[in-house]
Amino acid sequence: MNATDRTPEASRARLEPVGLRPWWVASGVLAVVVAGIAGLVLGPAQIGAWDVVVELADRLPFVDTDSGLGERQRAIIWEIRLPRVVLGLLVGAMLATAGGAYQGVFRNPLADPYLLGVAAGAGFGATVAIVSGIGDGIGIIDPIPMMAFAGALVAVVLTYLIGATGGRLDPVTSLVLAGVAVASFFTAIQTFVQQRHSETIRQVYFFVLGQLRTAGWDEVTLLAPYTGVCLFVILAVRRRMDALGVGDEEAGALGLDVRKLRLVTVVAASLGTAAAVSVSGLIGFVGIIVPHTIRLLFGSSYRVILPLTVLFGGAFLVAADLVARLALEPAEMPIGVVTAFLGAPFFVLILRTTRRSR
């Protein structure tokens, strides 16, 4: 970049507004609807797609229809499948958006809650709550997401501090290596804690592998407030993230408070990730697969990426959960296995793409 490119005028020229086209949003909504209907229809108890649509429509105001479903089928839809689908939409949207937000504020295409150690820190906090037996609160005051948030916040602070002392390493390499170190550290402590409390190892095991099993709406009620607030904050600052792409000095010359933007985004993404992990376990790679797919299909502006990751992230996780439920039917595969199976080759693709772009 030459001296002319560093001027505020040149930076503004590189930050021309990129509109969020209606058909892009429509495609995301369609993905959510298709994934949601599939999640409600497919399963051991077969229920017709039209019957599901009619049953859902019957709950709308001023609509009176009869789906013809029995009480057992209605209970399956409203108490088992629909809460699970909604939970998948919330968790997927939060993890994908948090990954995209980290990539924006750290200017690191490999950053996501899992690689930065946030998920491992949140997992450790939630594990402590599980083994200590204090995770029996009601609603949003349940200690599990609170302790998960504390662990996530400590993890991201450690990652950022360690990455800033990377010596001669470039910032991207320093950040990734710091995230690996912090994640390994918290994973080791988590393993030690669960070995000391073997009576809870099965519960912790399912937590570590990730799952969306839910009996009713308790988990959705617990997660929804955190997700709503955190997504609102991240989307509110998305327009400023594009300015970080020109560098901290240039962004500051444009009037952007870079430190404040990073702090607000990291806190919101950490809290949202902590809450999501507390109810779903450690589901990896969602924060890499979805934002990068959006980037490849719709462009590199975070004004576009972040709103679309909310939609496609939710649809992706619901679809992954569907695979986890049906692949080994009647048994159920941990959803973290499915996302890791998809994410590992995708991660290699991102590495190769990043190397060629330099």
Image (cartoon, helix red, strand yellow):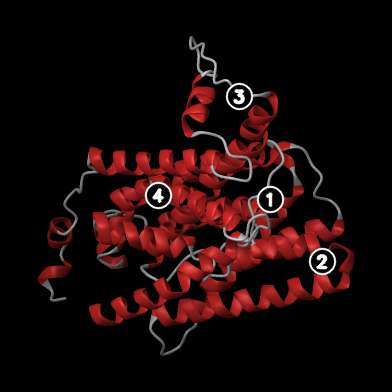
Task: Please tell me which of labels 3 and 1 falls first in the chain.
Answer: 3
Camera-side residue of 161 and 73: 73
| In this picture, residue 261 sits left or right of residue 228 | left
Residues packed near mark 2 inside 10 Å, few (<14), some (14 to 19) or many (20 plus): some
Task: Please tell me which of labels 2 and 4 falls first in the chain.
Answer: 2
Task: Please tell me which of labels 1 and 4 falls first in the chain.
Answer: 1
Q: Amino acid at mark 2?
A: Ile
Residue 3 sits in which quadrant?
bottom left
Pointers 3 and 1 in contact (C-beta within 8 Å): no
> Which mark is on residue 145?
1
Q: Amino acid at mark 1?
A: Pro
Distance between the alpha carbons at the discs numbered 1 and 4: 24 Å
> Which mark is on residue 73?
none
Tell me the residue at 34%/60% (across/down): 293
Residue 141 drawn at (x, y percent): 73, 41
Distance between the alpha carbons at the discs numbered 3 and 1: 37 Å
| Circle 4: element type | helix
| Circle 1: element type | helix
Task: Please tell me which of labels 2 and 1 falls first in the chain.
Answer: 1
Pointers 2 and 3 in contact (C-beta within 8 Å): no
Mark 3 vs mark 4, foreground winner is 3
On the question of residue 300 being in view, the answer is no
Identify the image quadrant of the C terminus.
bottom left
On the question of residue 18 being in view, the answer is yes
Tell me the residue at 39%/51% (across/down): 309
Q: Which residue is mark 3?
A: 69
